[in-house]
Image (spheres, rainbow, N blue to C red):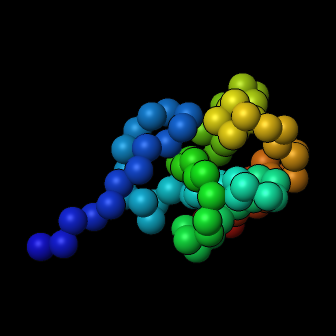
Amino acid sequence: MKKVPERRCVICYESKPKKDLIRIVKPKDEGVSVDLTGKKAGRGAYICNSLECLEKAEKSNRFAKVFETEVDKKIYLELRDLIGSK
């Protein structure tokens, strides 16, 4: 039986299968972006596919702390659209 890779949400710290989470990535030379493929190079962080975790992330500015850089508000809007459409 094949092992299912798990990742932990940076907001609620709950471990879930990797495919159930949304990956945010910060490559060395670019800004922070949403990685829908899960294969972009760079430092990654995962968030649950829930508005509750997204609101907590936005309120606490969690991605800026994780990536140690400024995170554009467009990222949060893009995540809100993604979560809302699922």
Residue at 87% of width from left, 45% of height from top? Answer: 73
Report whether 14 appears left or right of 52. Answer: left
Residue at 81% of width from left, 58% of height from top? Answer: 30
Which residue ends up furthest to the top in the rendered image? 60
Q: Nearer the viewer, residue 69 or 1?
A: 69
Quadrant of residue 36 in the image? bottom right
Whether residue 83 is visible here, answered yes or no, is no
Which residue ends up furthest to the right in the rendered image? 73
Residue at 12% of width from left, 73% of height from top? Answer: 1
Which residue ends up furthest to the left in the rendered image? 1
Quadrant of residue 53 in the image? top right
Q: In this picture, is 5 found above or below 56?
A: below
Residue at 69% of width from left, 30% of height from top? Answer: 65
Rendering coords of residue 63 (x, y %): 70, 38
Rendering coords of residue 66 (x, y %): 64, 35
Whether residue 53 is visible here, answered yes or no, is yes
Q: Nearer the viewer, residue 31 or 60?
A: 31
How many discs appear?
0
Q: In this picture, is 45 found above or below 86?
A: above
Which residue ends up furthest to the front in the rendered image? 29
Please state, as top left, top right, bottom left or bottom right, where the C terminus lies in the image. Answer: bottom right
Rendering coords of residue 22 (x, y %): 57, 58
